[in-house]
Amino acid sequence: MRAPALAVALLLALVAFVPPAHAAEDFGAVGNVNRLIEVVSTPQLEPGQSGDFVFQLNSTYPAGMVMWNVSLEATIYEYATIDQAIPVDRNWTYPYPILEGTIGQASGRSWWWNVSSVAPGSVTNLSFTVVTSSNEDLMPYGSVFSQASYFLWFSLRFWGNVSGTMTPFHMASRGYFDPQLWNEATNETNTTPCTPPLCIGNVNVSMLRVDGILVDSSFGVKPPIPRWPFYALIVLAAFFAALAFLFWVEENPGTYPRVEAWWARQRGRLHRLRPRRRRAAPSEKKAGPPPGPP
């Protein structure tokens, strides 16, 4: 009995001290990938304003799974309103909006950030500035009743240690891919009977040539609603409330004698301002026949 017990104890000790092997699908597991990028705040801007897009890179991997040679990129890829959607690509002729990097680097519509390593379980705060223009010739921005949104895709590349072998990984969000390729990769005919790690959910990542799908994001640009209609409504509401009170005073004589007297004077003045109708001149009496001879 002692020999089997000793063998089991020795086996458990060996298992405890042997480092776990990290399979390739661990880095691409949905539970890890969908939380790698967490958007903290997206700017909602008036044309001509600038605002910070704030987000975090969360290393959701357990101890020992270090991300090496990390490269993260964000790019504006689409402009959309309720009525239309326009790709922001090489055919985009507007110089704005642009991204400026306080953390990382930026040029035009793209921002990127590189670091040698990211430790497991760490959180890195990142941000870039969105710069807009108030000139519609330089940038479309919708209207008061149709807010414009600009969509961003993310791309994350790094190396990970898989069973002692350094392996490259690439995660990207939906906007990174060509729309036709994305439709093919999410078509049920193409994804079935695809199984992990070739498919994640209903997305065929092998067709997209990535190891996981990140989240897209966006920011809004819209002219402010004019304030004068709001103030006009307030004035009209106050006017009709005062008018209703005066009519109530008129229907209840003696309740507020001073207000009643003032209102009577005002009604008299208004009555005098009304144009008076001219009375028709009385018609002359028709002359009778001349008197006859006596």
Image (spheres, rainbow, N blue to C red):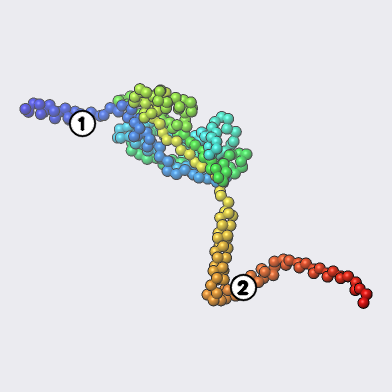
Question: In this image, 72 relative to 22: left or right?
Answer: right
The location of residue 191, given as percent across then percent down, is: 39, 24
Q: Which residue corresponds to the image point at 62% horizontal and 39% vertical from the top-left? A: 137
**First reached walking from the N terminus: tag 1 or tag 2:** 1
Residue situated in front as seen by the camera: 65 or 23: 23
Image quadrant where one finds the N terminus: top left
User: Which mark identifies residue 264?
Assistant: 2
Residue 94 location, quadrant: top right
Secondary structure under the numbered disc 1 in the rendered image? helix
The answer to whether residue 69 is seen in the rendering is no
Q: How many marks?
A: 2
Q: What is the CA distance from the residue labelled 1 to the residue labelled 2? A: 98 Å
Dot 2 alpha-carbon crowd within 10 angstroms: few under 14, some 14 to 19, many 20 or more: some
Dot 1 alpha-carbon crowd within 10 angstroms: few under 14, some 14 to 19, many 20 or more: few
Q: Amino acid at mark 2?
A: Ala
Question: In this image, 261 relative to 1: left or right?
Answer: right
Q: Which residue corresponds to the image point at 54% horizontal and 76% vertical from the top-left? A: 254
Residue situated in front as seen by the camera: 283 or 16: 283
Question: In this image, 265 relative to 180: left or right?
Answer: right
Q: Which residue corresponds to the image point at 51% horizontal and 42% vertical from the top-left? A: 220
The location of residue 293, given as percent across then percent down, is: 93, 75
Residue 6 location, quadrant: top left
Q: Amino acid at mark 1?
A: Ala
Q: Residue furthest right?
A: 293
Q: Which residue is mark 1?
A: 16
Q: Is residue 40 above or below residue 64?
A: below
Q: Of discs 1 and 2, which sits in the foreground? A: 2
Secondary structure under the numbered disc 2 in the rendered image? helix
Q: Is residue 205 above or below residue 248?
A: above
